[in-house]
Image: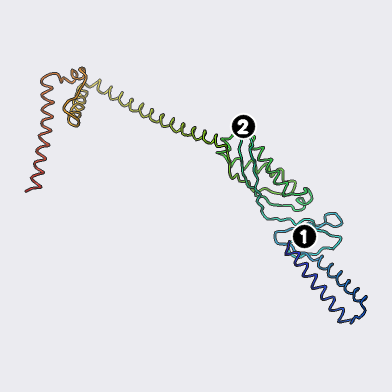
Amino acid sequence: MKSKSLFSVIIFVIIFGIGLIWTHAAYNVSDPAQSIIIAAGSFIIAWFISSAIKIADPWDKAVVLRLGKFQSLRGPGLFFIIPVLDTIPYWIDTRVITTSFKAEKTLTKDTVPVDVDAVLFWKVLDPQKAALEVADYISAISWASQTALRDVIGKTMLSEMLEGRDKISSMLQKIIDERTEPWGINVNSVEVKDVLIPASLENAMSMQAQAERERQARVILGDSERQVAEKFAEAALTYANNPVALHLRAMNMLYEGLKENSTIVIVPSSAVDTMQLGSMAGLTALTMGIGQEKTNKENDAAKNKEVRNP
């Protein structure tokens, strides 16, 4: 707007100066009264021409009214109007405009107070409607956006709001676009920037999420134990039909325990009877096996020592 005003002033000064210079050069006026008349005429002509010339930017549309009635939309570029008869009350910006709006301490459907910040992207498609159908379309869009946001929050659960921002944005775009369509305005998109909840509720939700993770861990552990028990049950069925395999398995377990840990192992008497360790033959076989293992280890150690010290 400053550039438009500056251009009009420059045009006025140039025309007024040319009029004065040309009049004095042509008529050589010496009468003061006539000089004043000529100066006043030059002033009126300069004002009329400078007021008739208008320039609109590429994104602007000028709403021209003639004697209070809508005349036309002018621009962009250079155009002319009739001073006094024509007026330009609005210069409508047809670019995409962003408007921030928020809803503070608004209750959700499950009665949780939240603060929501959002951004609206909109554009004027019909400058005539934007100028004539609403007094201040920018303020009207801001208020329509805030009321629509409060309506959507009141109909949405907190969990849905935190997880489905895209859904809320789509709902807001549809509602706001329906309200602003009679004003010649199109809503391109709505973006929900942030959803703030009370600190106490945030801590409670964090504890709930932690408890849920612990529950899942316990469920996984229980399922693992169930699978192990099923495998043990299958092994028990195999050993029940094959006593020799059970005996060999029991001997191997006892042998591994004696070899790895110590030479004293406490086992139930029923296990001793089952594995026939109480008999002399069983004890002899177990002792010989352990002794043979130790002898093999000693021989291996001696051979390694000889290799290192030839």
Whole-percent x, y for residue 164 in the image: 57, 39
The x, y position of residue 294, in whole percent, is: 12, 33
Element under label 2? loop
Asked if 275 appears above or below 214 in the picture, the reply is above
User: Which kind of residue does numbered mark 2 sit on?
Assistant: Thr
Q: Quadrant of the N terminus?
A: bottom right
Q: Residues within 10 Å of mark 1 (few under 14, many from 20)?
A: many
Query: What residue is at 69 percent from the left and 46 percent from the top?
Result: 142
Frontmost residue, 237 versus 128: 128
Name the residue carrying label 2: 111
Q: Give the amino acid at mark 1.
A: Arg
- In the rendered view, would you say 64 is above or below 9? above
Say which element carries label 1.
strand
Q: Position of residue 160 (x, y in %)?
A: 57, 36
Residue 88, image x, y percentages? 80, 58
Q: Which residue is mark 1?
A: 74
C-alpha span from label 2 to label 1: 51 Å
| Dot label at residue 299 | none
**Model colouring:** rainbow
